[in-house]
């Protein structure tokens, strides 16, 4: 009486082990024995970490399998989130929390003589993203799982994620991030499910029983091997899937060259193919127009689209009903080549007629824009795109032709406007404008904060907004409260839960109820104690990690984000130098200085020379300020290298002041700003991105606003911006820039930071000098406010209480209502 595939036991997943300490211990030891081939007595830390991770997997597995089965059964509409980046951070704690096993695991390990915290440290975080955009994708899939919305996140399993940063003589050096060197216990490889992804070659037309059709005859291909990752919802028994594709050379490809007898050439070709998923491009905001990057983009979206047809949909699915089953969300322009690929599959392979296919496509895609910077709007030279994807170029041309006909119909033969709106740009070389293609194809186009969405409509794509009324909408970003409050700040979470119960973790607007507690002196004391405890924890981490000492009683003033001129780390540097100069010149008594520790975290794109110079300067200022006895330890500049999600989780809960000081109109949203406010830091910031919404919610009294507004920035540009006039008008600014120029931070070497100084004086694209005096003024207000610790704490509590809106659960609800029209299932 063996198990037939239709036997109930074969259909249903095997139940999870019992959720008890004993059950956990047994499963853990079993995993050590059969998974690692060791016993507890001779297991390494790596062995134990892997066994623990596998144990957590075992608990989640039944739910995952059951979810997959039910999703096949109910056939609800699902979201295919297409993103070139997922900045996941460590998985162990998140998955323990989601499965409700944190305490059981801790006890079970203790029973085995193991400290859970030691095992946590074993995990190398998957850094498969650059910054905010990649972290946003990770927050979104967490929220969708927690809300029970059917979703697959699709992306690339980069063998090397964002580089590891070190400092050599204060300058950034990059090391490869070999995050997979010990393997990852969280992934499930399915080489048998590989998809073949083709490139190159040519197209031809042929007669298909009287119907003229096109087809693509590619020249080479690679295999896309899917790796599945569990995306568990927060204690709701739901597990969604993240599917990342890895490139492997195909046999046919090898054979062709092997048969020619050239072994070395065959191996070289294999390397070429496998390069596609080798490394994440480390440019945040400025895409590199490299051929390999377009290969990456096409590789993962083509595999994902095929996956949807092969795995999600039944074979006989009526294609005109696709919009009822699937929506592809394009995370910026990086996956936009999915649009012509989808059309190619429908028209060339499924033999749908063009207009019907286009109607389906326009309902199956939506596009999120994450930037306003012109240099970040991705374009692909027609020459390159046509060489790599000749059929896709034809399809893009056809989409553009039809689109421009419609534009002429609506706007008349306004050639200037036609040229401006064309998906094909002509200068400096003929190129495909991916944002335009996405806008034309997408059912909706959204910006990521109110101000950004408004600028997108009014400044970046006004013609498109006029042509497609109602297409442009806003969905303000959010962050997952699971990782960025509950896990990263257990002390604050405990305090909130004591006050409100546990419901806030999935219903963050409930934090509002803390407003009343802000008036309770005892609660304020407890809140202040939480902050102090988090500072001590950070201090321990920085001592162990970098040998830094964080002094007691210091305000922690934190600026952590990618290094980019528009984010204006230089403004922060000028504030530090100004304060320092005040002390050493004797104009400010050391006794009057509010003790502050400035913490920076920032990676520069390896080819971004100015950003690397600024990193060098920050380190240089730090080593002078930190070691000058005249400062009496009142100012400290700490720049721990390799800022990543793991460090963010330690730094943010300890921060007093959050620096969000981009030039107004440049930061699309920011999400770090939300994380800080939710952890009880006060923001000093410009009216930019989501800062605007944070300030509206927390109130002017609990936010340090400074600087020009976006319209003021615009009008200063229009007038003709002369940074030197600001230099001449402000003695503090003059003294600070002169100090840098004089070599005070470069051992007297006046050339080292000269390019930074002259850039500020004669170019200053991001108007650092124009906002300097307002910034210094706002920092004085910060000092004054911090002097009243109790009032500061009250403001910090109000920040927490009023920022529930910035949960990524709310963002997901907005996407669902405004764009996807999906619903939680079962
Ligand atoms: C954001 C990017 C980005 N905007 C190109 N654009 C990249 C562009 O690899 N590339 O080529 C990588 C990343 N990232 C950020 O998105 C915005 O600057 C933030 O303001 C925003 O909060 C975040 C999430 O929306």
Image (tube, rainbow, N blue to C red):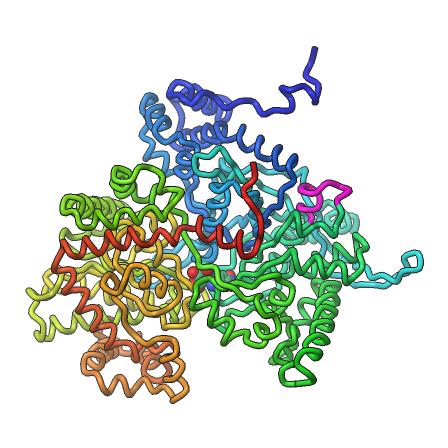
- Judged left or right of residue 790, residue 724 is right
Is any atom of residue 21 visible in this view? yes
- Judged left or right of residue 726, residue 608 is right
Q: Residue furthest top?
A: 1
Q: Quadrant of the rendered structure where residue 7 is? A: top right
Q: How many numbered discs, if any?
A: 0
Is any atom of residue 605 visible in this view? no
Which residues lie in the magenta part?
Answer: 306-317
Q: Residue at x 62, y 74 (%)?
A: 467
Q: Residue at x 36, y 37 (%)?
A: 120
Q: Is residue 21 positioned above or below 46 on the image?
A: above
Question: Residue 526 at what x, y percent from top left?
Answer: 18, 43
Question: Residue 415 at what x, y percent from top left?
Answer: 67, 85
Camera-nearest residue between 668 and 287: 668
Q: Is residue 498 positioned above or below 691 on the image?
A: above
- Judged left or right of residue 142, residue 629 is left
Which quarter of the figure is the C terminus placed in?
top right
Q: Residue at x 53, y 48 (%)?
A: 159
Q: Does the magenta run of residues contain 495?
A: no
Which quarter of the figure is the N terminus placed in?
top right
Q: Residue furthest right?
A: 210
Q: Does the magenta run of residues contain 312?
A: yes
Question: Residue 101 at what x, y percent from top left?
Answer: 39, 29
Camera-nearest residue between 167 and 378: 378
Question: Residue 166 at what x, y percent from top left?
Answer: 36, 56
Camera-nearest residue between 603 and 93: 93
């Amino acid at each position: 009486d063996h198990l037939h595939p239709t036997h109930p036991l074969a259909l249903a997943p095997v139940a999870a082990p019992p959720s008890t300490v004993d059950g956990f211990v047994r499963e853990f030891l079993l995993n050590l024995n059969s998974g690692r081939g060791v016993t507890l007595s001779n297991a390494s830390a790596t062995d134990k970490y892997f066994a623990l991770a596998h144990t957590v997997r075992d608990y989640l597995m039944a739910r995952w399998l059951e979810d997959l089965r039910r999703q096949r059964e109910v056939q609800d509409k699902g979201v295919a989130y297409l993103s070139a980046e997922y900045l996941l951070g460590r998985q162990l704690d998140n998955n323990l929390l989601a499965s409700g096993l944190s305490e059981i695991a801790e006890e079970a390990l203790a029973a085995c003589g193991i400290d859970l915290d030691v095992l946590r440290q074993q995990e190398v975080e998957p850094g498969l993203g650059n910054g905010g955009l990649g972290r946003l994708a990770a927050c979104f899939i967490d929220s969708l799982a927690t809300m029970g919305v059917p979703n697959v996140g699709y992306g690339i399993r980069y063998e090397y994620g964002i580089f590891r940063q070190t400092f050599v003589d204060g300058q950034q050096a990059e090391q490869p991030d070999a995050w997979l060197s010990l393997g990852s216990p969280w992934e499930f490889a399915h080489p048998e499910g590989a998809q073949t992804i083709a490139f190159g070659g040519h197209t031809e037309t042929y007669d298909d029983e009287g119907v003229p059709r096109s087809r693509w005859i590619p020249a080479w291909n690679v295999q896309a091997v899917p790796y599945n990752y569990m995306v568990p919802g927060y204690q709701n028994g739901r597990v969604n899937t993240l599917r990342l594709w890895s490139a492997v050379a195909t046999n046919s490809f090898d054979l062709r060259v092997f048969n020619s007898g050239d072994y070395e050439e065959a191996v070289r070709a294999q390397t070429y193919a496998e390069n596609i998923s080798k490394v994440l491009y480390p440019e945040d905001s400025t895409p590199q127009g490299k051929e390999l990057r377009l290969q990456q983009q096409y590789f993962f979206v083509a595999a994902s689209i095929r996956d949807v047809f092969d795995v999600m949909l039944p074979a006989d699915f009526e294609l005109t009903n696709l919009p009822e089953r699937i929506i592809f969300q394009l995370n910026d322009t990086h996956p936009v080549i999915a649009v012509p690929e989808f059309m190619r599959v429908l028209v060339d392979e499924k033999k749908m007629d063009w207009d019907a296919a286009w109607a389906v496509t326009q309902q199956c895609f939506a596009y999120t824009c994450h930037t306003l910077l012109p240099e970040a709007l991705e374009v692909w030279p027609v020459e390159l795109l046509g060489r790599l994807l000749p059929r896709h170029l034809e399809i893009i041309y056809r989409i553009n032709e039809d689109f421009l006909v419609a534009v002429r119909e609506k706007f008349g033969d306004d050639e200037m406007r036609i040229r401006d709106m064309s998906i094909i740009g002509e200068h400096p070389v003929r190129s495909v404008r991916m944002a335009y293609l996405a806008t034309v194809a997408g059912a909706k186009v959204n910006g990521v904060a109110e101000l950004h969405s408004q600028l997108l409509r009014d400044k970046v794509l006004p013609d498109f907004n006029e042509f497609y009324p109602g297409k442009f909408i806003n969905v303000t970003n959010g962050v997952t409260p699971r990782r960025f409050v509950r896990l990263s700040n257990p002390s604050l979470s405990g305090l909130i839960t004591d006050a409100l119960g546990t419901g806030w973790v999935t219903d963050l607007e409930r934090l509002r109820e803390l407003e009343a507690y802000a008036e309770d002196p005892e609660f304020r004391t407890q809140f202040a104690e939480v902050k102090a405890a988090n500072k001590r924890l950070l201090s321990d981490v920085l001592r162990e990690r970098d040998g830094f000492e964080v002094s007691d009683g210091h305000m922690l003033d934190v600026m952590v984000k990618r290094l980019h001129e528009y984010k204006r780390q230089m403004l922060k540097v000028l504030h530090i130098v100004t304060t320092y100069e005040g002390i050493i010149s004797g104009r400010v008594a050391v006794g009057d200085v509010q003790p502050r520790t400035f913490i920076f975290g920032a990676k520069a794109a390896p080819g971004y020379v100015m950003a690397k110079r600024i990193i060098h300067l920050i380190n240089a200022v730090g080593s002078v300020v930190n070691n000058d006895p005249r400062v009496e330890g009142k100012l400290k500049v700490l720049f721990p290298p390799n800022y990543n999600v793991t460090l963010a989780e330690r730094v943010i809960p300890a921060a007093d002041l959050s620096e969000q000081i981009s030039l107004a109109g440049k930061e699309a949203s920011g999400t770090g700003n939300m994380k800080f406010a939710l952890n009880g830091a006060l923001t000093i910031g410009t009216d930019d991105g989501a800062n605007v919404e944070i300030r509206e919610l927390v109130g002017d009294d609990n936010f340090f606003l400074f600087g020009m507004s976006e319209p003021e920035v615009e009008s200063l540009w229009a007038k003709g911006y002369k940074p030197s006039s600001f230099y001449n008008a402000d003695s503090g600014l003059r003294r600070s820039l002169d100090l840098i120029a004089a070599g005070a931070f470069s051992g007297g070497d006046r050339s080292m930071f000269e390019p930074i100084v002259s850039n500020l004086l004669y170019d200053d694209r991001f108007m650092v000098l124009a906002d300097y005096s307002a910034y210094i003024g706002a920092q004085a207000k910060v000092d004054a406010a911090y002097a009243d610790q109790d009032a500061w704490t009250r403001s910090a509590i109000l920040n927490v209480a009023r920022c529930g809106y910035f949960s990524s659960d709310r963002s997901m609800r907005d996407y669902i209502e405004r764009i996807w029209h999906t619903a939680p299932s079962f």
